[in-house]
Amino acid sequence: MDKYAIIVAGPSGAGKTTVAEGLIASLGTLEMSRSATTRAKRGDGKDDEYVYLSVEEFENSIAKGEVLEYTNYSGNYYGTRKCELDRIWDMDKNPILVLDYNGVKSLKEKLDCPVYAIYVYTSLEEAKRRLCKRDEISGPTEKSRETIVKRVKENVADYKKLYTMAELFDYYAENKNVTSCIEDVKRAVDKLAGGREPMELVEKLKITNTFRSMAANFAE
């Protein structure tokens, strides 16, 4: 099996996790990489999606160079440890990760195998609509509304700056329909694994320039 890693990134509400899970179900050769975190377990049925560490354990892993990328969100560390990717490769599968563009840059620099970075996107208006719908389903609270506002602002900020790093991603996939988007990404990964580029730089610049225009015209 050819060894590689896939990263799916994108704005909040674009459906990147759904696309990643769809790729896992469709290809059968991928495994979702679990993030290491220092946050407490929530008992929400998703605790097995993380590896739980103390702050001391996490910081020691950083000091030893065992953490490939990490962030501190709301006072808690989240990151990707090399041992987690090794665990998946030892299963004769390839890891798929859902990260932001900072994580993409770090993994591309630190891994000694191909890293295929896919950016799943939608319009800022549609991303906001999906975030609000998700909030309605789970039961809106003041905190969840504040989180939506924060994520929408982060989406706008990301769309403003992506033009300057268009080459960071190997492919940009619009998620109008999740089934079609998964098939689109599958074709892109097949090309990348075969040593072909699925998208030229001029197309990447065209798409990210559209992001920049969206951000300039978006009313938060």
Image (cartoon, rainbow, N blue to C red):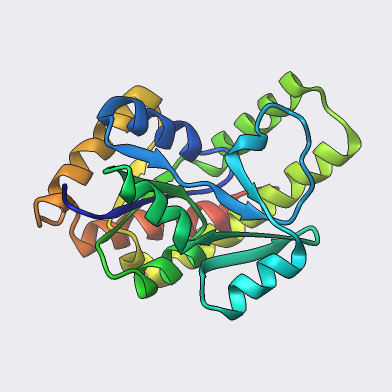
Compared with residue 140, is residue 16 higher up or lower down, i.e. above or below?
Answer: below
Q: Is residue 177 visible?
A: no
Q: Residue at x 60, y 71 (%)?
A: 61
Asked if residue 75 lies left or right of residue 132, the reply is: right
Q: Nearer the viewer, residue 179 or 96?
A: 96
In this view, the residue farthest toward the right is 142
Asked if residue 203 lies left or right of residue 24, the reply is: left
Please provide percent x and percent y for residue 216: 56, 58
Q: Residue at x 56, y 43 (%)?
A: 124
Please provide percent x and percent y for residue 183: 26, 30
Please provide percent x and percent y for residue 186: 24, 36
Q: How many marks?
A: 0
Q: Is residue 20 visible?
A: yes
Asked if residue 195 lies left or right of residue 128, the reply is: left
Compared with residue 46, is residue 58 higher up or lower down, i.e. above or below?
Answer: below
Q: Residue at x 61, y 45 (%)?
A: 50
In this view, the residue farthest toward the front is 90
Please provide percent x and percent y for residue 198: 17, 51
Q: Nearer the viewer, residue 191 or 181?
A: 191
Q: Residue at x 43, y 63 (%)?
A: 104
Compared with residue 91, is residue 85 higher up or lower down, i.e. above or below?
Answer: below
